[in-house]
Image (spheres, rainbow, N blue to C red):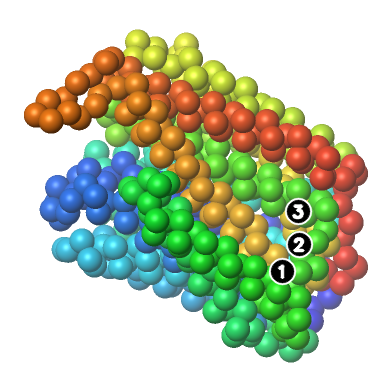
Amino acid sequence: METTTPPQSRRWWALVAVSIAQLMVALDVTIINIALPRAQVDLNFSAANRQWLITAYALAFGSLMFLGGRLSDLWGRRSALVVGLVGFAAASLVGGNATTFAVLVSARAAQGVFGALLAPAALAVVTVTFREPKERARAFVIFGAVGGSGAAIGLLLGGALTQWTSWRWCLTINLFFAALSLIGVMLFVDGGREERAIHLDLVGSVLGSAGLFALVFGLARAITTGWGDFDTWLSLAVGGILMVLFVMWQSRSENPLLPLRIVTNRTRGGSLIALFVTTIGIFGISLFLAYYLQNTLGYSPLKTGMLFLPLVAALAFSALLASARLLDLVGPRPLVPVGMLLGMMGMILFTRLSAHSDYLGHVLPGLVVTGLGLGLIFAPSTASATAGIEARDAGAASAMVNTAQQIGGSVGTALLNTIAVITTRRVGCVKLPGQLVCRVNVTDATIHGYTVAFWWVAGFFAAGAIVTFFMLESGVPEFEADLAPLI
């Protein structure tokens, strides 16, 4: 195993390469959202089926994350990145040229499969490459800012491509990102395969993947059927049982898919909770504000995407100027709870929205405050969640980070959307035999549903601030001596 530190320029170019890959994976969660209406008209599929274009990606991505992380340890990080990038690009090309709904859904699922291999490998490269605390902090600030802003960038890019070209470019644009990242990976990232033998845990792979699949499927099903559906709870129950069995198996397996030593550390656990809660918040913002800006304020897809730019700018500013300077001095404890409180304040600002609100006075302040908070959360949490990880476990630890975010996104989408819909129905219109009786204006009822959902997200951020304050340790996390750079 390589023990010498590679040239500085080589390390940073490797970071650029994997950050592009991370951006591609992150923005594909939301880039298709704005394109859905036109894709639906073009391919003639029902409104009930359109959510599967989002769910298929999340199901494959979330359920295969543990396996993808371990495969990156087994094959080597460069090999995993190459396979992931080529596969993701090929799936995007097929989806962009799809002529039927079935082909498009299959392509989205294939994107999720290769994303589950790509995302842990990209984070693992950062984890094992930067050892010096100040450099490591800066690297994770950049990587975290890219990942954290990916959802908003996806909305912006999706709006621009849909309005100026075609919804199909929301998929085929990935060939550009994949090509750039692939060139960087081939030039600057070495194999990263451990000299110590790593064997694949087949039983753990089945239990973990099936358990995560059932959980994500149950959460996705709740979006359309509600939380009172029996099959929804059956799926969640099966997923929970399988995940308990997965943990029990990992404690006795000789070659665990997810070594439990990775998640038992207090600071690491707090960091994973922070990423989980924060992703719920991001989905709340992107989901409801996108609808509000387009359906209530009447903005075009392109303008809607552009109006999310202040969130991206605030996140980058907070991450680069605050986290980069403070993380290696004080550690994650003061930064993450403060970021949570800022996120809570941003959500509270969004609860003031009405049918007559304007962007500058009501939407923009919430975006800026929330973005500042997210910048204080993502980079420190990602760095702390992977601090002290041995090189042989880098892929598995990175998979845990990505899994926390993916499950958070699924929970956020299912829970918040259900809350908003139920609230809207409760105060809005009720279907009676032969007529539709409305107690209040439909627009006002819809916005009230958004408001209640924003209050829930504010509550999640408040709880996250308390939990992370007590779980995260003061000071900079320890780094293992044998965490050698592998590029």
Q: Is residue 57 left or right of residue 394?
A: left
> Which residue sits furthest left?
434
The residue to which callout 3 is attached is 269
Give residue 273's position: percent from left, percent from top: 69, 48
Q: Residues within 10 Å of mark 1 (few under 14, many from 20)?
A: many
Give residue 65's position: percent from left, percent from top: 56, 67
The residue to which callout 1 is attached is 394
Give residue 37's position: percent from left, percent from top: 22, 43
Earlier in the chain: of badge 2 and badge 3, it is: 2
Residue at (76%, 62%) from the top-left corner? 263
Q: Residues within 10 Å of mark 2 (few under 14, many from 20)?
A: some
CB contact under 8 Å: marks 1 and 3: no
CB contact under 8 Å: marks 2 and 3: yes
Give residue 151's position: percent from left, percent from top: 47, 44
User: Given the image, on which type of amino acid does mark 1 rest?
Assistant: Ala
Q: Whole-Å distance between the Cαs marked 1 and 3?
A: 16 Å
Q: Whole-Å distance between the Cαs marked 2 and 3?
A: 6 Å
Residue at (37%, 66%) from the top-left corner? 109
